Image (tube, helix red, strand yellow):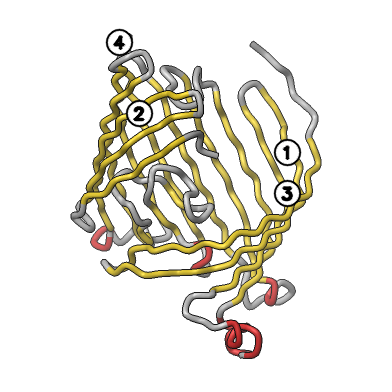
Amino acid sequence: SWCGLGLADINAAYTYHTTSIDWYSDHTLKSWLADHHSMSLYFSEFHLRDFTFAFGLEESFFANRSGFSLDQMLNDEAYGLDQTKSFFSVFLRGRYDNMDDAYFATRGIYATGSVGWHKENRYMFGDVDSGFVDASIIWKSYLTPAARLTFVPQIAARVVVGKNPRWYDNLAGGYMAGGYLDQQLPFAGLSNPLHTEDLTGILRLDMRYRMAEKLYLTLMANYLAAADRLDQPDRLRQVWGAGAQVAYASPIGPVSLSIHWNDYTRRMGAYVNVGYEF
């Protein structure tokens, strides 16, 4: 089918959220509490067959609240300089989706990609900092060689080029992309996200079997490789993870229980999901 090229919508948006996250860095579980304000103006809903695109501008403000009192945040000048940052961004985002089902697809492809340029506001009109670029992609293919059996090969990757602050660092972990922070890549096996290097890639394969009309068993295996530079293979980080999931397609969305393990923490974990993910 052919739906032609649709006209774009003009959007203005403001979002705010507080993130409380425990993540792994250097085999240590660290806590982080941060506020994120975002204002954006963008064109969206360029439709071409199964593709959708969005392009626009964004202003982001971050504040680290980990271990700081309200009095420190309001009155300490060093806090404002070191623990708060604001950035101007230009972004392009795209999505391709021709799956035959949103959650238990048997055929089709789902892919998202983005590229953005970011610069800290206090250096906007100087040559001290030229900003940095990030690009990411997530790709899933659904292949069904038998009536009840579906294979889902997947690729997830994110690259950061330039001197970037921690607010835009790579994270990997959890079953859903963007679980805690927008740039978080999914990795079955890690309950808490892992802080990774600027070049991070994940290969994953799921094998899903339909045990009954609405009951599914999925086995998952994935491999993460990360480095700050391609010419330093001796500093390559490698992590393996695996999991198993039982899911039921209920009227309110998927209800699932997942268990997983990884060779970074060497710990088992579990995750329960009730309802649609959004």
Q: How far apart are marks 3 and 2 (CA)?
A: 38 Å
Q: Is mark 4 on a helix, strand or loop?
A: loop
Amino acid type, label 3: Gly
Labelled pair 4, 2 in contact (Cβ < 8 Å): no
Q: Considering only order in the chain, which callout, 2 or 4, is on the residue closer to the N terminus?
A: 4
Q: Considering only order in the chain, which callout, 3 or 1, is on the residue closer to the N terminus?
A: 1
Q: For this view, does 5 lie left or right of residue 174? A: right
Crowd rating for badge 3 (residues with CA inside 10 Å; few <14, some 14–19, many 20+)? some
Q: Considering only order in the chain, which callout, 1 or 4, is on the residue closer to the N terminus?
A: 1
Q: Distance between the residues labelled 4 and 2?
A: 19 Å
Q: Distance between the residues labelled 3 and 4?
A: 43 Å
- In the picture, which quadrant includes the N terminus? top right
- In the picture, which quadrant includes the C terminus? top right
Amino acid type, label 4: Ala
Labelled pair 1, 3 in contact (Cβ < 8 Å): yes
Which label was assigned to residue 44?
1
Amino acid type, label 2: Ala
